Image (tube, rainbow, N blue to C red):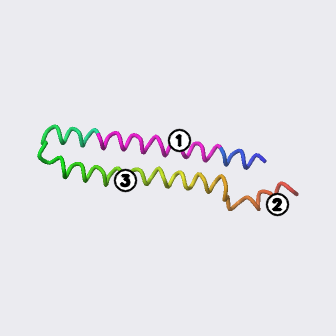
Amino acid sequence: MEFFAWCMIAAGFGMAIGSFGTGLGQGLAIKSAVEGVARNPGASGKILTTMMIGLAMIESLAIYVFVVAMIILFANPFTEEVLKLVAK
């Protein structure tokens, strides 16, 4: 059962690293957008649109990490092989 414990740890670390990276990316994107609007309020529409598209791209990374973590936890393709090895 050690394999399944490592799967839980890997999924947890994957989510932590993915969330940390996307949080930093979103924070930097919003910071830059606010600075851009402060310098040129007339361009706020274009800046807001570009920022929202960028945030959606960054957030998709977090969703991909979540999907991979769920696959590791619940649909692991190596489960049968590990159970066969443990049974021997």
Q: Nearer the viewer, mark 3 or mark 2?
A: 3
The type of residue carrying mark 3 is Ala
Q: Residue at x 19, y 42 (%)?
A: 36
Residue 14 shown in magenta: yes
Identify the residue position indicated by label 3 in the image: 56
The type of residue carrying mark 1 is Ala
Q: Where residue 31 appears, x then y in whole percent?
A: 28, 38
Q: Where residue 43 appears, x then y in whole percent?
A: 14, 48
Q: Residue at x 16, y 37 (%)?
A: 38
The type of residue carrying mark 2 is Lys
Separation of disc 2 and disc 1 at Cα? 31 Å
Q: Earlier in the sequence, mark 1 or mark 3?
A: 1
Identify the residue position indicated by label 2 in the image: 84
Q: Secondary structure at mark 2?
A: helix
Task: Between residue 76 and residue 38, name the one nearer to us.
Answer: 38
Separation of disc 3 and disc 2 at Cα? 42 Å
Q: Secondary structure at mark 1?
A: helix
Identify the residue position indicated by label 1 in the image: 16
Q: Is residue 14 left or right of residue 8?
A: left
Tell me if mark 3 has few (under 14), some (14-19) or many (20+) residues whose alpha carbon lies within 10 angstroms of its own.
Answer: few
Q: Which residues are magenta?
A: 9-30
Q: Earlier in the sequence, mark 3 or mark 2?
A: 3
